[in-house]
Structure formats: structure tokens, C-alpha cells
Amino acid sequence: MTEHYKSGFVNIFGAPNAGKSTLLNALLGENLVITSHKVQTTRHRILGILTEPEYQIIFSDTPGIIDPQYNLHKKMMQQVKNAVEDADVAILVHDITLPVEELETIVNKLELKVPCILLLNKADLIKDKNSIQKIKETYKEKFKNWQVIEVSAKSKKNIDKIIPLVLVHLPLSPPYYPDEGISDRPVKFFVGELIRQQVFELFHEEIPYHAAVLVQSFEEKTTLDVIKADIIVSRETQKIIIIGKNGSMIKQLGINARKAIEEFLQKKVHLELFVKVRPKWRDNENYLKEYGYH
Ligand SMILES: Nc1nc2c(ncn2[C@@H]2O[C@H](COP(=O)(O)OP(=O)(O)OP(=O)(O)O)[C@@H](O)[C@H]2O)c(=O)[nH]1
Ligand SMILES: [Mg+2]
């Protein structure tokens, strides 16, 4: 390691569905965090660590910024607040197809005090280059101190331009984390997230927002891992929907989640899912703690 080594916290913020998690995966070159087309997919601050010979960047994915309606939301926004406080650099992700006012609302709530890079994401949705240029000028005019670039986290447009911009602001420091780790969270956490992602994929309306996943046991065997997990919902009617007619939905959920987990672990998996009802868990301190929302 040289005396020029740089290391620091680069925290990713933005509205729900802006593409923050997709961006983190693109920056890391790995499918670490879950994404979905529905809002409020991410519920935790999750570190994604990129270690290179000259620098270590500790990215944080964070939940999309919302007005809290229940205790779970408050916990999610507390994680955003913590990430605002310890950032060396902020990356703000904004959907380029949305009005500038929506970004201003987010910016006012965040009160960022560190250098900021504004990414106008989903640029692939605007085909005309001149339009993109025009939109970009508006943002540059409004946010004069910030670097502004159009990107597409999904199709990886301009993703390679982000790290050089980050490095300009990153302090000289030895690495914070050992170079083999990619996240601060255990494998069990990501397994739970992959199951929750399938709940977001398969179910609609309120179900994903009333569901939590708790991995109860994770047994590593030589040829396959045995995983048992609970899917927690708030109401009996939600449990009935998740199980489906003759168990058809929970079966599909199990198949999809198992495939995703096997890909993540690069190993065969036996997955058992149980659906449990815990009324009002999203407002209950003890349940929230038990399900990992501290
Ligand atoms: N067309 C297009 N879609 C994108 C792009 N980046 C992300 N998306 C899509 O936008 C949706 C939301 O992406 P996420 O990465 O889950 O968004 P997020 O900001 O993490 O959302 P929350 O966790 O809910 O706050 C997904 O369907 C993504 O595939 C992009 O560059 N172009
Ligand atoms: Mg997310």
C-alpha cells in the first residue's frame, strides 16, 4: 500500500425507485443488493466495498427517502440519516425522466454537507441526445457546486465515469476493511433479501410492504446448504394469499428464491419456507429488532 492510498465512505441517496441499488451493483460489478420495479425495496443501509490497489471505496446503498408512516419507515429513514452524517462523498441518484422539483424535495430533506455527485439515471429512456443535454443543463444551473452526469445503471452507461469523480474528493487513508470482503453483512442477510425480492416480484399491492423475511437457520453441508426461513406478514388474509391455492404461490416463491440463492452462493440449496402472521409487526419494537431493523 502506498502513502497515496485513498479510502472513504461514498453514500448513495435518492427517491424510492431512482435506481440506487441497481447503481451499487453496477459499481461493484456484482449482484449484491436486491432491486425491483416497486418502490421501497431497500430497507437497510448496506455496505458494498470496492478494494483496488490505489483505493478502497465503501459504498452504502440506502432506502429511498420517504415520509415515514410507521415505525419500520422511521427505522429506514434513521439509516439514511446516519449515512448522511458519515459520508465523505454523496452520490445522489435521480430519475432523469422526473421533474427537477422532485429532486429539490429530496435535497431539502437530506441537508448534505459533503461533496455531491448528481447522477441523472435511466438516461437510456431518453433517446434524443439533445434532450439529455438540455435536461442536464437545467440541473447544472440549479446545483452549481455539484458534478452532474447522465448515466444508466441498468445498461451501464457512464458508470466508469463515476469513480474518477469520487476519487477527487476521497481522503488519503489506509483501507477500513480487509480486502477480501464485499459487504459488512453476513451471507444469511443476503439470503433473506433474495427471498424478500421474490415476494416483491410475485405479489402486488400491500403484500410486499407487509412482508419481512427472517432466516431461521442456515446449515452448510458439503454438497448443499439447508436453509429455513420465515416469511412474516401482518394479517391472516395476507398469509392465505402468499400460500396460494393448494400452496401454489409459496411453491413458486420457493422455486424462484432457491434459484436466486443458488446463483448467489454458487452451491445447491434446500430451502424451506414458513409463513407466519405477526399483527402490526411494522410498528412493534421487539419484532422490528428480531427481523433486523435496529
Ligand atoms: N430503464 C432503466 N431502469 C432502471 C435503471 N436503473 C434502475 N432501473 C430500474 O428501476 C427500478 C428500481 O431500481 P432499484 O435499483 O431497485 O431502485 P432503488 O432506488 O434502489 O429503489 P428503493 O430501494 O425502492 O429506494 C428497477 O426496475 C430497475 O431495473 C436505468 O438506468 N434505466
Ligand atoms: Mg434499493
Image (tube, helix red, strand yellow):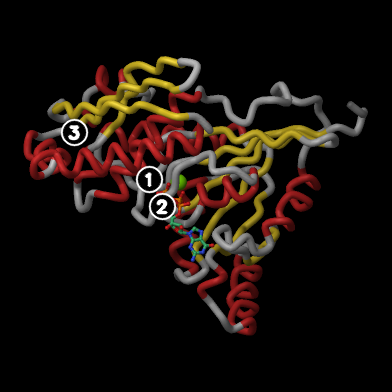
Is there CB contact under 8 Å for labels 1 and 2?
yes
Per the image, label 1 sits on a secondary structure element best described as loop
Question: Which of pointers 1 and 2 indicates the residue nearer the eye?
Answer: 1
Q: Which residue is mark 1?
A: 41
Q: Amino acid at mark 2?
A: Pro
The answer to which image quadrant residue 149 occupies is: bottom right
Q: Residue at x 30, y 30 (%)?
A: 213
Q: Residue furthest right?
A: 3
Classify residue 138 as left or right of residue 292.
Answer: right
How packed mark 2 is, by other alpha carbons closer than 10 Å (few <14, some 14-19, many 20 or more), is many
Please state, as top left, top right, bottom left or bottom right, where the N terminus lies in the image: top right
The mark closer to the camera, 2 or 3, is: 3
Residue 276 at what x, y percent from top left?
A: 17, 26
Residue in front for this viewpoint, 83 or 124: 124
Residue at point 73% right, 47% down?
166
- Ligand 1 within 8 A of label 1's CB? yes
Nearer to the camera, 121 or 171: 121
Q: Please, what is the three-letter code of the amino acid marked with disc 3?
A: Val
Tell me if the residue at label 2 has its CB under 8 Å from ligand 1.
yes
Question: Which of the 4 quarters of the picture holds residue 157?
Answer: bottom right
Mark earlier in primary sequence (2, 3): 2
Figure quadrant of the C terminus = top left
Which numbered tag is attached to residue 16?
2
Instruction: Using the numbered discs, state the Cα–Cα distance from disc 1 to disc 2 in whole angstroms.
Output: 8 Å
| Position of residue 120 measured from the top left corner of the image (x, y, whole percent) | 58, 64
